[in-house]
Image: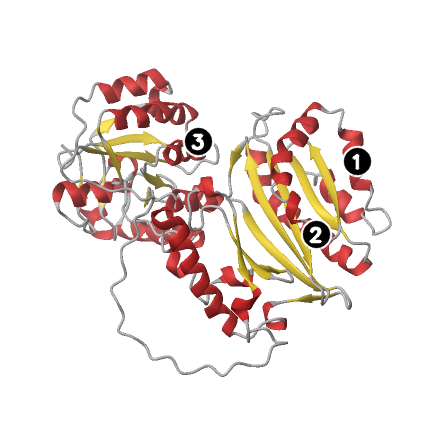
Amino acid sequence: MKKHRFLAAFTACTLLALSAFGSFTEAAAADSRTAALTTQSESYFNFHKDTQHWGQAKTFISAKDPFSYAVQYPVTNQAALDEQIIKTLKTKADAFENAYTKAAEEKAEERTPDKHTGTLIVGYDSYITKDNIASVSFLETRKIDGAYTEPASWSTYLFDTTTGKALTAKDIFRDSYREKASAYALDYFQKTYGKQLFGNYKAILAPESDVFSTFALTDNSVIFYLDKYEILPGDCGAIRLEIPREVFKGSFLTDPEEVIPPVVEEPAQPEEKPSETGRVIDPNKPMVALTYDDGPSPTATNAILDVLEKYNAVATFYDVGYRVAQYPDVVKREAALGCEVGSHSYDHKDFKKLSASQIQADVKQVNAAFAKAGVKPTSFRPPYGNTNATVQANVPLPIVTWSVDTLDWKTRNVDSIMKEVKGAGNLDSKVILMHGIYDTTAQATAKLVPMLQEQGYQLVTVSELIQYKHNETPKAGKLYGYSYFQ
């Protein structure tokens, strides 16, 4: 597949011809898709409108098949700095195209101007201090088929504008800045967001975290950046945490070095269990577990997650390893929203037909895919629900099937899916089987979740159902099947 015109533009771009981006945008304005993307990207660019204090904003917008771009970046008229900025954006474009070229090729026959296309949207913040340190913070969002395939993610770059040298934290801070940033951040987020915080946010805000390597400088503050879904629900968006410079007194290399008294460690206190999305589970009330096999899908799974996020609900996703490898950020979003993520094998082989060594090889392969995505599966659903003693002896996870089959894979019809669920009667303690790769399943989920909540059901994960309804911690190798979930 030929590289998109965006890459050619960036490769050919010189500091004397940066205005070509603007002229290209104007020339393409007549194209309806480009015009639509221009309108769509306005909200992204407006997010940065009041935080661009260095350089002149330039915009490149182009909607082509299969890759579209809406990119805003600063032009500083300093040759070395502008060249570094262009190279940075080209690297982002290369990574984006490499990530989605295979998917686009696989869908080439189905692709239309509005289907199976990818979009990269990049906006930026920029600052300049009185001692000539410039900061550029890019916020990148990738989309495909109109669905978010990656949370909005930040990357930051600092420069000494007098020398053109790129700077890192070691050029600006002593190591003590991390402890100060961490203490401030924990206090701020706990007081401001409380139970909205999810996951192991304390680890993400720990002094050694990469979060504190991503920052911008102003004359009055240090701004740290957290990605969407990193520690907060998606409606909180990508986060800027602005910490006053005085918090870091003694930690800048230009400050007199502090004499820090030794810290007397207090006995460790038991860490409280995160409340995920702030849900409270009442074991005395009805509960049901929605489960989705065969994903992740950048379109259908993300649409399902949109519904769950809207209604502060969770589900369990049994993902196959090869798709985890293709769409790791969808899996990250599943986990970030407090959902349970399980394994559904690497490529959906019938485990009853495999030997012990073949099962072990599959487990190793699928675990590697999940590890690369930064998510650990908590249970295993065998393909087709098929299991036996060999499977149970060689899969080091609880083995879970279901008790209500929606047949969504067969009917691909919203009304039929709803009919199967309604026909199952009392759903308390039941596990409902669906598949996270069908648009019709996502559409049915949009009806099913509010309906179940209105009927008084708590939507829980499979592990929560086992814990609260059966007073049991799921055990590796044990089968939790149809009769269990009655």
The CA span between labels 2 and 1 is 25 Å
Q: Is residue 460 visible?
A: yes
**Local crowd at mark 2 within 10 Å, few (<14), some, or many (≥20)?**
some
**Earlier-in-chain disc, 2 versus 3:** 2
Q: Which residue is mark 3?
A: 303
Q: Nearer the viewer, residue 337 or 366?
A: 337
Q: What residue sits 50% from the left and 59% below the top?
A: 211
Which element type, helix, strand or loop, lies under badge 2?
A: loop
Q: Residue at x 36, y 50 (%)?
A: 194
Residue 203, picture quadrant: bottom left
- Splitting the image into 4 quarters, where does residue 45 fall? top right
Amino acid type, mark 3: Ala
Residue 353 is situated, as x and y percent measured from the top left of the image, at 27, 41
At 65% from the left edge and 62% from the top edge, which residue is drawn?
A: 219
Q: Are marks 2 and 3 in contact (CB under 8 Å)?
A: no
What separation in Å lies between label 1 and label 3 (alpha carbons)?
34 Å
- Image position, residue 250 (x, y; %): 55, 76
Q: Viewer-nearest of labels 2 and 3?
A: 2
- Across and down, in percent, residue 16 comes to 87, 50
Quadrant of the rendering where the N terminus is positioned: top right
Q: Amino acid at mark 1?
A: Phe
- Judging by the rendered image, the residue that carries numbered circle 2 is 53
Q: Which residue is mark 1?
A: 24
